[in-house]
Amino acid sequence: LKIVGDPAAMRSESSEARSLGRTIGFVPTMGSLHEGHLSLVRRCRASGSVTVASIFVNPAQFSPGEDFERYPRDPDRDARLLEKEGVDILFLPEASDLYRPGHSTWVDVTGLTRGLCAAHRPGHFRGVATIVAKLLNLVRPDAAYFGQKDAQQAAIIRRMVEDLDFDTRVVVCPTVREPDGLALSSRNVFLSPEHRLAAPSLYAALEAGRRAVASGERDAGRLRSMMTERLQGAGFRPQYVDAVGATSLEPVDPLDGEVLLAAAAYLGATRLIDNVTLTVPAGTVARS
Ligand code: PAF
């Protein structure tokens, strides 16, 4: 595992790999790695590309009052995990090298940033899109790997890559879960033992939503209320529970086509997000 801190050195590494006829696969992360990240690394490695992972806790995607300062960081452990997975290059830049004095350019993906997490985290996706654009420019990968758990982020990055003509394929990989259904997240370490026990109810509520749709429910409002009540019953403070088009991320009511059921909810001070996708067969009759 080669650790590269300097952005210019990262560019040179990529150019060298390309001059040797290699393709480059990229897994951007904020570190504190878990099996979800490692599943992206494995998928990338399986493509036969030179595998680059980055760790950068991006200050621009945290609003004031969010958990930037206490976001879990353990670069030594992360580097050991990446080495074990056979990653070729770990790009570990400093904030001062990526946001240099005078930095004034931001990437704003409109439309997809109206609802879901964007409605509650102003500026978050501007920070995400900007850093991902910068990282793609430095690493210049043929493919970049993201998790479906952050469905809105994945949709926004796909849109940005398409709109700004990045020569990179966006690969979105399935959410990795604990045996009890809890989606893996670096923030799960903040859960108290009691909240950890309640946490799988987030996925359970979404799955209950999926089952309701399979049984004929087509009314988004009713579905949202049912999932919200389940979450409240399990001790969550829901931030949003929504049913949107899987690609447009716009509300769909009645439910139709490819649908994303997504929720964000707090257990104590810890905010968890999760989602499931489902297909509503065309022309199916609404349940009365
Ligand atoms: O998903 C994440 O970990 C981050 O949002 C990303 C894509 C690495 C950008 O900072």
Image (cartoon, rainbow, N blue to C red):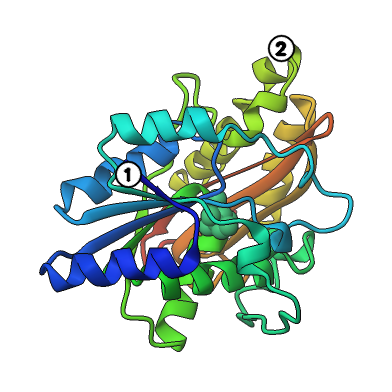
Give the number of the mark in front: 1 or 2.
1
Please name the residue that numbered disc 2 is placed on. 193
Q: Quadrant of the C terminus?
A: bottom right
The answer to whether residue 229 is above or below residue 110 is above
Q: Secondary structure at mark 2?
A: helix
- Toward the top, the furthest residue is 193
Pointer 2 local density, CA inside 10 Å: few below 14, some 14–19, many at least 20: few
The answer to whether residue 165 is above or below residue 8 is below
**Is 288 or 174 nearer to us in this picture?**
174
Residue 27: x, y in percent?
39, 53
Residue 45 can be seen, yes or no: yes
Q: Secondary structure at mark 1?
A: helix
Residue 269: x, y in percent?
83, 33
Please name the residue that numbered disc 1 is placed on. 41
Mark 1: amino acid: Val
Quadrant observed for ligand 1 in the rendered image = bottom right
Residue 126: x, y in percent?
67, 72
Distance from mark 1 CB to nearest ligand 1 atom below 8 Å: no
Residue occupying the point 82% across, 49% down? 66
Mark 2: amino acid: Pro
- Toward the right, the furthest residue is 65
Q: Quadrant of residue 283?
A: bottom left
Pointer 1 local density, CA inside 10 Å: few below 14, some 14–19, many at least 20: many
Q: Quadrant of residue 128?
A: bottom right
The answer to whether residue 122 is above or below residue 180 is below
**Is 262 or 278 nearer to us in this picture?**
262
The answer to whether residue 270 is above or below residue 178 is below
